[in-house]
């Protein structure tokens, strides 16, 4: 019963956002741990299905961070991060 009440509470909390974003395109950056951990992959996909089910139009964009870092390494550049965000120079 506790799990059911928790789910109901989450849904009630989400209703204003569902109303606000119904019919809108929602961009989701999918990368990092969510791409390699099975439980996170499943959770992300379930969330995307829910967004579509309630009338939103989810678009998934690949993060690409590891590939960008690898290419920079090949080019002799060092990846710089500030507060978890990649910082690039003019080059």
Image: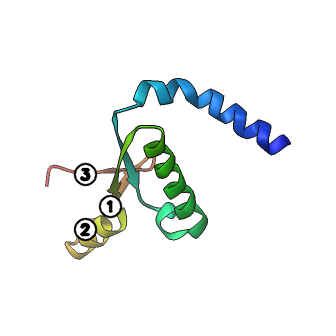
CB contact under 8 Å: marks 2 and 1 = yes
Which residue in the protein does label 3 denote?
88
Badge number at residue 79: 1
Q: Residue at x 47, y 44 (%)?
A: 53
Mark 2–mark 1 Cα distance, whole angstroms, equals: 7 Å
Which residue in the protein does label 2 denote?
72
Task: Of the two numbered discs 2 and 1 on the same chain, state the one appearing first in sequence.
Answer: 2
Q: Furthest-left residue in view?
A: 91
x, y percentage for residue 64? Answer: 32, 62
**In the image, 17: left or right of 73?**
right
**In the image, 9: left or right of 71?**
right
Q: Residue at x 75, y 38 (%)?
A: 6
Q: Which of 85 and 30 lies nearest the eye of the viewer? A: 30
Secondary structure of the residue carrying numbered label 3:
loop
Q: Which of 66 and 61 lies nearest the eye of the viewer? A: 61
Q: Is residue 74 above or below residue 17?
A: below
Q: Residue at x 71, y 32 (%)?
A: 9
x, y percentage for residue 17? Answer: 50, 28
User: Where's the N terminus, which quadrant?
Assistant: top right
Task: Of the two numbered discs 1 and 3 on the same chain, state the one appearing first in sequence.
Answer: 1
Q: Furthest-right residue in view?
A: 1
Q: Is residue 81 above or below residue 9?
A: below
Mark 2–mark 3 Cα distance, whole angstroms, equals: 11 Å
Q: Which of 72 and 34 lies nearest the eye of the viewer? A: 34
């Amino acid at each position: 019963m506790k799990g059911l009440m928790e789910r109901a509470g989450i849904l009630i909390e989400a209703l204003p956002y569902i109303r606000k974003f119904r019919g809108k395109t929602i961009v989701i950056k999918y990368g990092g741990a969510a791409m390699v951990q099975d439980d996170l992959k499943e959770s992300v996909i379930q969330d995307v299905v829910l967004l579509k089910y309630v009338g939103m139009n989810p678009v998934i964009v690949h993060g690409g961070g590891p590939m960008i870092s690898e290419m920079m390494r090949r080019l002799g550049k060092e990846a710089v991060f500030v507060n978890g965000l990649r910082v690039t120079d003019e080059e």
